[in-house]
Amino acid sequence: MTSSTDYAPTGPSTTVRVLRITLLAFLLIAATGFVVGFMAAHRDRGDPDMSLRALAILAAVALASAAAAFQIFRDGRRLFTGVSGLPRRERASLRWLGIALGAGLVGGVATVVSDDAGWLTDTRGTLSPALAIACAVLLATLAPWLTWRWWREIDEHEQAAYTEGANVAGHFTLLGGIAWWVLARARLVPEPDVMALVVAMSFVWTGVWFYRRYF
């Protein structure tokens, strides 16, 4: 008989699966952005017949995306197999984390797909006002609520890991942002990009949390 400890979210196999799901989710969003930008550039050229090389590139991206989605499904199923045997707080923590990751993936893909100019080629003035407003409202309401519900369920160890990640990421953004601004004032680097700082902060925060949580 399999015990509930076989599914505890602290084992090495679980660590690998969580990391793989995260990386593959970013890969899916990047692949979607690539295809959208590729098709937008093709449309701007008057929709000529695609070359064999272009078709091969699109086919390769589609195959890689399908493989990534399949692997996410497999890892997710293994992570949640036997979840009923976990303590209530661990079940709730996994549930809210899964909901948040799923919502983030859907939102990221929707934003990329709706970007007419291509996610990788333009970052201003390419989203529809309705989608921009919807995303802003969800970020201001649903995201904090999901975070609060998840925070209520996690144990002290995970709270400490998350708090340490926030501390490191906050100082990274503060000091790194000021350093960037100072260098930009001397015209040594381009003007600070807010979204670049936010993305970098997110990676630092997640990286510290993940390391403290699983290693």
Image (cartoon, rainbow, N blue to C red):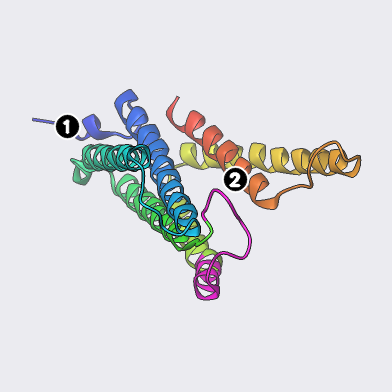
Q: Measured along the vertical axis of the image, is residue 14 above or below residue 34? A: above
Q: Residue at x 50, y 62 (%)?
A: 116
Q: Is residue 119 magenta?
A: yes
Q: Residue at x 57, y 40 (%)?
A: 205
Disc on res. 199: 2
Q: Position of residue 126 (x, y in %)?
A: 57, 64
Name the image quarter holding residue 25. top left
Please state which amino acid type lies under the numbered disc 2: Val
Q: Position of residue 167 (x, y in %)?
A: 66, 40
Q: Of the residues tagged 1 and 2, which is closer to the observer?
A: 2
Q: Measured along the vertical axis of the image, is residue 109 above or below residue 53? A: below
Instruction: Indicate left or right for 145 with 66 as reference.
Output: right
Q: Are marks 1 and 2 in contact (CB under 8 Å)?
A: no
Please state which amino acid type lies under the numbered disc 1: Ser
Helix, strand or loop under label 1: loop
Magenta extent: 118-138
Residue placed under numbered mark 1 in the picture: 3
